[in-house]
Image: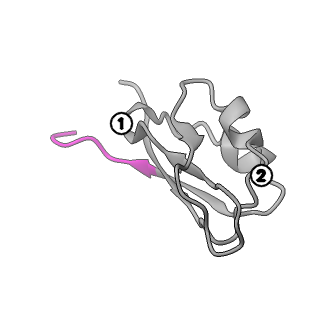
Amino acid sequence: MARKGKVVIDKERCKGCYLCIRACPVGVLEKDTGPNSQGSYPSVPARPEKCIACGSCYLVCPDVCIAIYEREEAGA
């Protein structure tokens, strides 16, 4: 069974370097359409259902504003 995950990004800490977007192997993340209070356009999980909890985005984030949670499948 494939792993499923949940990506949580602290939008206020994200400076919009987009390293996480490039690191994601399944295309979960995108640039936000609106800025945070600092004027940066943070990354957001645009396709959260695709997350496989690999942690690639977490590992490359220089501002430590990403958390990854592994989800349990219903009925498992």
Q: Which residue is mark 1?
A: 49
Magenta-span inclusion, residue 46: no
Residue type, numbered disc 1: Glu
**Looking at the rendering, which quadrant does residue 73 occupy?**
top left
Q: In the rendered view, would you say 21 is above or below 26?
A: below
Taking the image as shown, residue 13 lies to the left or right of residue 11, namely right
Instruction: Give the extent of the magenta segment.
Output: 70-76
Quarter the C terminus occupies: top left
- At x 54%, y 57%, the residue is 34
Of 47 and 35, the residue lying toward us: 35
Q: Which residue is mark 2?
A: 61
| Mark 1 → mark 2, Cα distance in angstroms | 21 Å
- At x 60%, y 36%, the residue is 54
Residue 29: percent from the left, percent from the top?
55, 39
| Mark 2, other Cα within 10 Å: few <14 / some 14–19 / many ≥20 | some
Residue 46: percent from the left, percent from the top?
45, 41
